[in-house]
């Protein structure tokens, strides 16, 4: 006779439960060009320009890999970004440190095999409502460092390298679908080391090989960094770089120097408050009016200097050597105040900066046509008209004034220098112009031509080529 089947309850009772084990798989691997800001917008104050917050080269190759577990509760991300073109030659201009025309570090052109680079590793725990992350970030830049001969009061630039390391923990708590609070704390080190390359970066004369081999880092600063921000984002993405809605954030930075300060001041504390608000107002179909207001205000024993001018993601930036920063402010970090198109970087600088931007964005073909467009360049082609206003100043609010352009005559027989107030409104320098945007080979490229607001198309325009979305 055939055996009788076991009752269903007995089968379930005998079934075994197995603990879930983590299983990981690669979610994505990407390679391409990238010049976005990866982790931090603050660079160590070097006393040289221009500044590229995404790296010191316009073309950087970036490789990124992401790994998720089966339930997507844990994520690992690693990235490497290296410069593609250039050589180890000085490419910056000095704006001075300590009141003299000597930059503490002049970034040079990097290359894929001998130059700066950026690396970061990140792990995210996403199982709970509160997200937790651990981040390690490292950046290196090749350049030149001035060694001063105290006997003759002369200096020579020698090959050097700037190292930045950041260890950070991040917590993100969503209040609802559009609001969140984010906090990060970590330790950041910035240091400059000499490179025993055998020659000066400017003259090519062999010098300081033994000094570079024997000495430790010539400059070093270690900070405990804290960053708290409140984020509101109620925007809807209509198409590429075209949104509707409002988003803004307020943030506060508190940094405390751990090692002994080398600046003139004795304090170790640094504070910064900033905001960034953007509103995208629909006009007709995908045609929108984009408004942005942003500001940063730094105070404390040490501060952050903001250079006004240019635009975000500018691939071949230019800068003015003057005005020089106010070195009595004891700057430890530097950044950019953007956007102010029609001007080069450093039309003004200071530990306080405010910018206002207005753009009319017209995706030409998707707005005027009622049928699908397969070609990405035509589909994403946009024309814009912009107005930019900005100002930067050092010290208290009473020092705010319209930025000025400085022209210095190098001919000693004609000792005439000219200072002209920049065009604008009130304390704000102003610029206006037009631009075009679209995607090419998968990259969103921006080309703008801007004029300073001191005449109606009466001065030479400034052309700026950039990569990246939004402003």
Image (cartoon, helix red, strand yellow):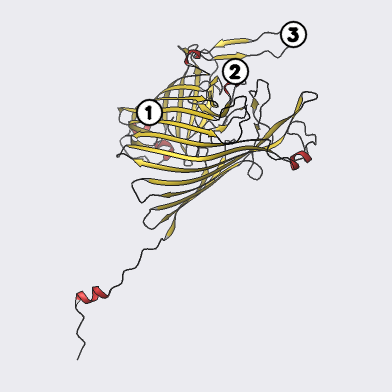
Which residue lies most toward the bottom here? 1
Q: Secondary structure at mark 1?
A: strand
Residue at 37% x, 28% y: name it.
Answer: 278
Give the Cα distance between marks 1 and 2: 30 Å
* Quarter placement of the N terminus: bottom left
Mark 2, residue position: 323
* Relative image position of residue 388 (x, y in whole percent): 45, 21
Instruction: Please state the total of marks drawn on the protein image.
Output: 3
Mark 1, residue position: 278
Residue 354 or residue 398, whichever sits in front: 398
Can you tell which quarter of the image residue 331 is in?
top right
Q: Nearer the viewer, mark 2 or mark 3?
A: 2
Q: Secondary structure at mark 2?
A: loop
* Relative image position of residue 206 (x, y in whole percent): 80, 36
Can you tell which quarter of the image residue 166 is in?
top right
* Relative image position of residue 452 (x, y in whole percent): 51, 16
- Relative to residue 292, is residue 152 drawn left or right? right
Q: Is residue 430 above or below residue 4?
A: above
Pointer 1 or 2: first along the chain: 1
Residue at 49% x, 45% y: name it.
Answer: 135
Q: Nearer the viewer, mark 1 or mark 3?
A: 1
Can you tell which quarter of the image residue 156 is in?
top right
Mark 3, residue position: 413
- Relative to residue 126, is residue 214 drawn left or right? right
Q: Are marks 1 and 2 in contact (CB under 8 Å)?
A: no
Circle 2 crowding by C-alpha within 10 Å: few under 14, some 14–19, many from 20: some
Circle 3 crowding by C-alpha within 10 Å: few under 14, some 14–19, many from 20: few
Pointer 2 or 3: first along the chain: 2
């Amino acid at each position: 006779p055939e055996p009788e089947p076991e009752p269903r309850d007995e089968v379930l009772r005998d079934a075994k439960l197995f603990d879930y084990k983590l299983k990981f798989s690669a979610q994505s691997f990407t390679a391409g060009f990238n010049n976005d800001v990866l982790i931090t917008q603050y660079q160590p104050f070097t006393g040289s320009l221009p500044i590229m917050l995404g790296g010191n080269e316009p073309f950087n190759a970036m490789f990124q890999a992401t790994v998720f577990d089966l339930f997507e509760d844990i994520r690992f991300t690693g990235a490497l970004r290296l410069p593609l073109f250039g050589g180890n030659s000085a490419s910056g201009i000095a704006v001075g440190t300590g009141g003299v025309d000597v930059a503490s570090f002049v970034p040079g052109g990097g290359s894929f095999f001998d130059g700066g680079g950026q690396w970061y590793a990140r792990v995210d725990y996403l199982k709970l409502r509160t997200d937790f992350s651990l981040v390690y970030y490292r950046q290196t830049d090749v350049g030149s460092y001035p060694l001063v001969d105290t006997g003759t009061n002369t200096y020579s630039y020698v090959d050097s390298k700037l190292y930045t390391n950041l260890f950070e923990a991040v917590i993100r708590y969503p209040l609802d679908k559009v609001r969140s609070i984010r906090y990060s704390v970590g330790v950041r080190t910035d240091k400059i080391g000499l490179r025993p390359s055998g020659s000066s970066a400017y003259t090519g004369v062999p010098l300081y090989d033994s000094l570079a081999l024997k000495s430790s880092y010539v400059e070093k600063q270690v900070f405990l960094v804290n960053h708290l921000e409140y984020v509101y984002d109620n925007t809807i993405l209509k198409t590429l770089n075209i949104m509707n809605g409002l988003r803004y954030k307020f943030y506060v930075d508190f940094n405390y120097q751990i090692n002994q300060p080398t600046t003139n001041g004795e304090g170790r504390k640094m504070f910064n408050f900033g905001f960034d608000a953007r509103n995208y107002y629909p006009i007709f179909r995908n045609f929108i009016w984009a408004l942005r207001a942003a500001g940063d205000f730094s105070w404390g024993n040490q501060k952050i200097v903001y250079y006004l001018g240019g635009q975000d993601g500018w691939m071949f930036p230019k800068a003015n050597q003057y005005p020089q920063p106010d070195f009595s402010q004891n700057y430890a970090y530097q950044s950019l105040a953007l956007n102010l198109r029609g001007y080069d970087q450093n039309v003004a600088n200071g530990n306080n900066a405010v910018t206002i931007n207005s753009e009319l964005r017209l995706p030409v073909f998707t707005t005027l046509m009622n049928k699908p467009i397969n070609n990405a360049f035509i589909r994403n082609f946009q024309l814009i008209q912009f107005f930019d206003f900005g100002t930067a100043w050092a010290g208290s609010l009473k020092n705010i004034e319209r930025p000025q352009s400085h022209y210095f005559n190098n001919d000693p027989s004609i000792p005439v220098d000219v200072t002209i107030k920049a065009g604008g409104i009130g304390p704000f320098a102003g610029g206006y112009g037009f631009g075009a945007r679209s995607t090419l080979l998968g990259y969103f490229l921006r080309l703008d031509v801007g004029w300073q607001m001191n005449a109606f198309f009466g001065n030479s325009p400034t052309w700026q080529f950039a990569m990246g979305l939004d402003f």
